[in-house]
Image (spheres, coloured by chain):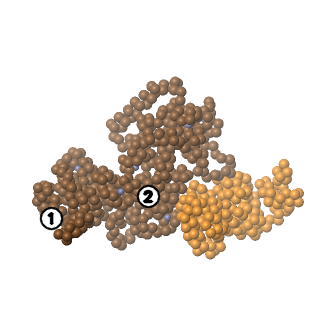
Chain colours: A brown, B orange
Amino acid sequence: MLQFLSFSRKTLSNNLSIYIKTNTGNTLSVDLDPTWDIKEVKEFVAPQLGLKPGEVKIIFAGKELGDNISISECDLGQQSTLHAIKITKKPNPPTLNNAVIEESDEGKPLCETLSDLSFSNDDSEEGPTEQRKVHFFVYCPTCKALKNGKLRVRCHFCKSGAFTVHSDPQNWNDVLQSKQITGLCENNPELCANVLNNKEPTFAEFYFKCSEHTSLGETDEAVPLYLIRPNLKEVPCLACADINETVFVFPCKEGHVTCLDCFRQYCTTRLRERQFWQHPEFGYTLACPAGCPDSFIQEIHHFRLLSESQYTQYQRFATEEYVLRSGGVLCPQPGCGMGILADPECTKITCINGCGYVFCRLCLQGFHIGECEAPEGDVGAPGDCSYNVDPTRAAEARWDEASKVAIKVLTKPCPKCRTPTERDGYKRLGNGWKSLNEDERKKYFDRAKAIGLQHKKEFPVGENPTGLQKITIDSFELFPSTEIFSKRRKIYSL
Amino acid sequence: MANIAAQRIRREFKEVIKSEEVAKCAIKVELLNDSYTELKGEITGPPDTAYEGGTFVLEIKVPETYPFNPPKVRFITKIWHPNISSVTGAICLDILKDQWAAAMTLRTVLLSLQALLSAAEPDDPQDAVVAKQFKENIEMFQMTARHWTNVYAGGPHVNKECDDKIKRLVDMGVEEHQARVALSSYNWDIERATEQLFS
Ligand SMILES: [Zn+2]
Ligand SMILES: [Zn+2]
Ligand SMILES: [Zn+2]
Ligand SMILES: [Zn+2]
Ligand SMILES: [Zn+2]
Ligand SMILES: [Zn+2]
Ligand SMILES: [Zn+2]
């Protein structure tokens, strides 16, 4: 009896509490022994579904798992979900067609078949010295930190995890870009295959979860920080020359590398000087510190590596830049910095919800009639070759307590990390409209026009004392084009 | 100073010391403090230039944010060059400003400065007076630069005529360097230089 108790306690402590989903819509909650293989799982699960073990297949992370795979090999984690699907057709007899039988990976889970090497984006000729299991880093919104991550797969259309891929992703592009890898949706094969009248195959959708906390369900996702990678080639850090295990690989052709400490230092330095860039698509970001072309960091969640207070500052600066780029002005009054969106033609701006200062949009001096006194593009005195991190620029753009309200107005929680960010507001007008089709685009612009007309009604030309619109999400939709950003950029010559 | 900057400078310092340029005595770096924030650099004037035979001392200050921001460098040795201030020694060189990249090192900076001595860029001047002379009267510029190299950087070319003109102004009670600046700025026209000095 005693023996039995201690035995069962031992198994209990090691047990994995797992959800099993079926394609009939049922979910079973089961405790599995991680030493079991899939055959044993089937024997355990099938009766509960009223099936024979041979009639069930187990799907996890885009793969049908083979009978001799053990659970511990699958990086499952507590509260993970396995899919048990009833086999409808007779399993295909092993065919000897042109496909080769090199499939020694058959039945292995995805985490076992992917290797770090292929995800290092390194096409140097050196062969793989040792195959290492792939290692992903994520920003986990639950742990609020950089964590180890797990790759998961679901159906692009119905989002069901009962999905098997036709091939493994070979690189980051396959994982991050949509519609790269095809597969079979086992949840509702008919429906998902027919979604587009069979014009398109069914595609896999990849996403990430945090490995370091118990899954809170299928929506508990993490953001892949794919530029953080294991340093397989032992590349020294560009800045401090140390060789670190985990590095930040910049998206430049050379793939320049810094250690994570130096990456943080780089961000802090640039942040302090407000030298991030407002990229029209990616948001407020940085490029490779070696000055490489086309090397902007696309996934701005990488800046989550900053401390909490630095990240807050990052978001504030980003929002300010965003106001400027969307045709807005920041009140030049010291200590104010209210963000104001005004009609593009209007040069007389009043800081309506802020300090009340009335100023000229072009020169940011007090409002005046006639030409501005210091024309833009005023070059310094001859012989003055000064490099500027324009100190006035930083001073000119500060948000006070009141304007934090404005930030809240224009941002809504980021779908990826669930915190308000500049990017969400940005997306609303960013380049999103470009991907719309003719029809949708017309609708979008009609709506923008309607909002514009409404504003005109509220502030008829000549009667509008300020030419102001309050910053609201709606008024952002008036500026859907990035052309306007670039025009503004000239005016403020940032 | 942040650890990263100090660590990086320590490594770079070793790199410069081992470099072949040091072996050829073309560049040199010395540490001025233990925290690696201040260094003294030295470059020799490139051959076939007005700076040939001169040794130019540089002040190098390493910011806390190094290598993400450039080191602050200026000439201690007085020099006559369109891109270097004849007054403060401040340098106008893109890689010390917005073209700086974290992959650059003290060695690249010193070699770039040496290159700047052989290829001035008068259209992007630091010293407008020198740049004007460079563009309008290159021979006069060459002579002046050679004379400054001789006087301040130990260059071999003594210019008797220049020395005489300076002596005449010094005899009038003008400080020697001031006299040299005035004469250099007015193409060694002693009357105009005098006029400027006493106006
Ligand atoms: Zn987590
Ligand atoms: Zn589906
Ligand atoms: Zn480093
Ligand atoms: Zn690079
Ligand atoms: Zn104001
Ligand atoms: Zn004006
Ligand atoms: Zn986010």
Kind of element beneath mark 2: loop
Asked which quadrant contains residue A445, the reply is: top left
The residue wearing badge 2 is A251
Where is residue A35? Give x, y as percent.
Answer: 22, 67
Asked which quadrant contains residue A252, the reply is: bottom left
The quarter in which the N terminus of chain B is drawn is bottom right
Mark 1 or mark 2: name the one nearer the start of the chain: 1
Identify the residue at image location x=75%, y=63%: B148
Where is residue A141? Give x, y as percent.
Answer: 38, 53
The residue wearing badge 1 is A94
Asked if residue A163 can be seen in this view, the reply is no
Q: Amino acid at mark 2?
A: Pro
Chain letter for the residue marked with disc 2 in the picture: A
Q: Residue furthest front?
A: A2
Which mark, by number, is residue A117? none
Q: Does B15 sit above or below residue A374?
A: below
Q: Does A158 sit above or below residue A129?
A: above
Is label 1 in contact with label 2 (beta carbons under 8 Å)?
Answer: no
Mark-to-mark CA distance, 1 and 2: 43 Å
Where is residue B177? Give x, y as percent.
Answer: 79, 60
Identify the residue at image location x=86%, y=60%: B170
Where is residue A113? Give x, y as percent.
Answer: 28, 65
Kind of element beneath mark 1: loop
Identify the residue at image location x=54%, y=41%: A337
Q: Amino acid at mark 1?
A: Pro
